[in-house]
Image (spheres, grey):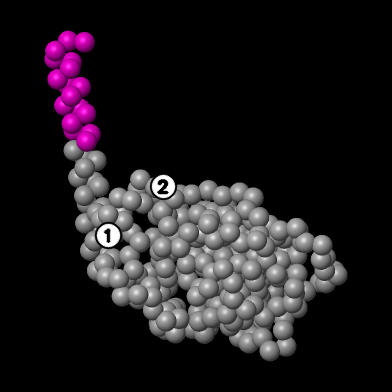
Amino acid sequence: MSLKEVFTFRRVCASVIAVNGIYMYAQYRRLVLWRPEYKDAGRPEEKHRIAIFDNIAPTYDLTHNITHAKLGITAAKANMLERAKGHVLDVAAGTLENYRLYRGISSLTAVDKSVMMCLEMKRKIEAAKPDYPVTIVCADASNLPFNDESFNTVVTTHGLCSVENPEACLHEIARVMRPRARYFALERGRVYYSSLRRLLEWLKLYPNPAIPWKYGYFEDRDPLALLTGCSSLVVTDFAVFGYGMNYSIVARRAYSEKVSEFTNEPRLHIDAKIIYQYTPKND
C-alpha cells in the first residue's frame, strides 16, 4: 500500500468516526432534551401512575404509534400476535391497539386498571366491530377476575413495566392459562447489553427514576429475569431489539397435574367489573 493510499484510508476512517460521533452526540442531546431531568425521588404511588394513564388515554395512540413503528415495536408485536389462538387475554391492555393484529381468534378479553384506558378500548371496539367477541374489564393485573385455566393465549405489551406488582401479575397470568396455552410478552426495560447499560447509567440517561413520575411506567425492570424467576412459567424463546431495551418473550405454563375441564368460553368472577361486551353480528 502506497503512502498516498495509507493517508486516504486514514482520512476515510477518521471521517467515519467523526460522522458516527456527531450522530451519537445528536442522539444523546435529543434524549437529554426529550426526557425529564434525572432525579431520584423514590417510586410514585400506584394512584399517581394510574392518574397519569387516565390522563394520557385519549391521546396515547396519536403520541406513541409513530414512535413504535420507527423503533420496530409495531412489527415485533405483529410477528408475535399473529400466533395468538383461541380465547385471548390481553393484560394491561392500554388502549387495546393490539386488536388490529389478532387474526382468527375465538374471543378477546382485555384488562386494564385505568378506567379511561378501558373507555378508550370501548370506543375503539365500537367503531371497529371486529369479527370476534370482545370483553373489556377494569381490574388489577395482580388479581385477575377469571377462573383458573380460562385462556389459550395471554398477551402483555409494555405491561410488566406498567403494573404495580409484576411478580404477582405473572403468577396470575400462569393461573389463568390453560395447560397448553402460550404467553406472549413484548416488554421494555433494563438494557440487555451490559456495556451499553453501564454507559447509559453513567450518563444518567437510562433508566431514569423520574420516568414513572411523568409517564407512569418503570424503565429499570428486567422482563426476562422476571419471567425466568417465575416458578409458574417457563420461557421457551426470546429476542431483544432496540438497543437491547425491548424484549420479545414467549413462555408456557410450568408443568401442572391439574387439567381443566373443557369450556367454550373464559369464565369471569361474579364480581368482575365489566366495562363493555361486544358480540359480532352473524351474517
- Mark 1: few/some/many CA within 10 Å (<14, 14-19, 20+): some
Residue that mark 2 sits on: 193
Magenta includes 15?
Answer: yes
Residue 127 position (above or below residue 103): below
User: Between residues 84 and 247, which one lies in front from this camera angle?
Assistant: 247
Position of residue 96 measured from the top left corner of the image (x, y, whole percent)? 55, 71
User: Is residue 83 shown above or below 120?
Assistant: above
Distance of label 1 from label 2 (alpha carbons): 16 Å
Classify mark 2: residues with Cα within 10 Å, few (<14), some (14-19) or many (20+): few
Span shown in magenta: 1-17
Q: Residue at x 38, y 73 (%)?
A: 212
Where is residue 15? Give x, y as percent: 18, 33
Instruction: Compare residues 89 and 49 and report the one nearer the observer.
Output: 49
- Name the amino acid type tagged 1: Lys
Query: Which quarter of the rendering shows the N terminus?
Result: top left
Q: Residue at x 57, y 80 (%)?
A: 140
Q: Is residue 89 left or right of residue 209?
A: right
Q: Is residue 256 visible?
A: yes
* 197 or 88: nearer the viewer: 197
Which residue type carries mark 2? Tyr
* Label 1: which secondary element: loop
- Residue identifier under label 1: 204
Query: Does the magenta-highlighted stretch encompass residue 267?
Result: no
Would residue 249 be found to the left or right of residue 181 on screen?
left
**Based on the displayed image, in which of its 4 quarters is residue 7 positioned?**
top left
Rendered position, 86 above or below 239: below
Most extreme residue toward the right, as rendered?
261
Q: As drawn, which residue projects farthest toward the bottom?
A: 271
Residue found at x 48% / y 59%: 222
Q: Is residue 248 left or right of residue 282?
A: left
Rendering coords of residue 6 (x, y %)? 17, 17
